[in-house]
């Protein structure tokens, strides 16, 4: 449920910026169980339902993922 709420929130923010188009979001993740909800949301189509086109970018550890977010390589970190 929290994943859908987060996706809806992100979609509402991006909808006002991008109009009615689908918004591309690059999500940095480290392959741990805590990242599973993002994969479920992407696979189940929940992200598309709220107008988000998720692109998942894998990192082996947290610091490179954080660096990607600060240099705009990724827009979100899981």
Image (spheres, helix red, strand yellow):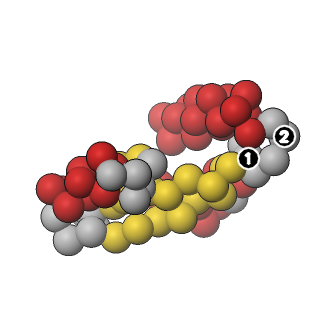
Q: Position of residue 35 (x, y in %)?
A: 35, 56
Q: Position of residue 56 (x, y in %)?
A: 47, 65
Residue 25 lies, in percent from the top left, at 56, 53
Q: Which residue is mark 1?
A: 51
Q: Secondary structure at mark 2?
A: loop
Q: Indicate left or right for 31 with 21 as reference.
A: left
Left or right of residue 16, residue 71 in this image: left
Specify few, some or many for label 1: CA neighbours under 10 Å numbering under 14, 14-19, or 20 or more: many
Residue 28: in sight, yes or no? yes
Residue 42 in the image, given as x and y percentages of width and height? 58, 60
Above or below, 43 relative to 48: below
Q: How many marks?
A: 2
Disc 2 and disc 1 in contact, CB within 8 angstroms: yes
**Which of the two labelled residues, at mark 2 and mark 1, occupies the earlier sequence position?**
2
Crowding at dot 2, Cα within 10 Å, few <14 / some 14-19 / many 20+, comes out as few
Badge 1 marks a residue whose secondary structure is: loop
Q: Residue at x 63, y 29 (%)?
A: 13
Q: Which residue is mark 2?
A: 20
Q: Which mark is residue 69?
A: none
- Residue at 72% x, 54% y: name it: 48
Q: In front: 52, or 16? A: 16
Viewer-side residue, 37 vs 73: 73
Q: Nearer the viewer, residue 14 or 54?
A: 14
- Mark 2 to mark 1 CA distance (whole Å): 8 Å
Residue at 63 percent of width and 55 percent of height:
24
- Taking the spot 41% from the left edge, 68% from the top edge, the residue there is 57
């Amino acid at each position: 449920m929290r994943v859908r709420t987060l996706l809806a929130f992100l979609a509402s923010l991006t909808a006002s910026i991008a109009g009615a188009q689908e918004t591309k979001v690059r999500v940095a993740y480290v392959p741990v169980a805590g990242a599973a909800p993002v994969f479920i949301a992407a696979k189940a189509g929940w992200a598309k339902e709220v107008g988000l086109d998720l692109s998942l970018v894998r990192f082996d550890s947290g610091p490179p993922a954080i660096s990607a977010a600060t240099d705009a390589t990724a827009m979100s970190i899981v």
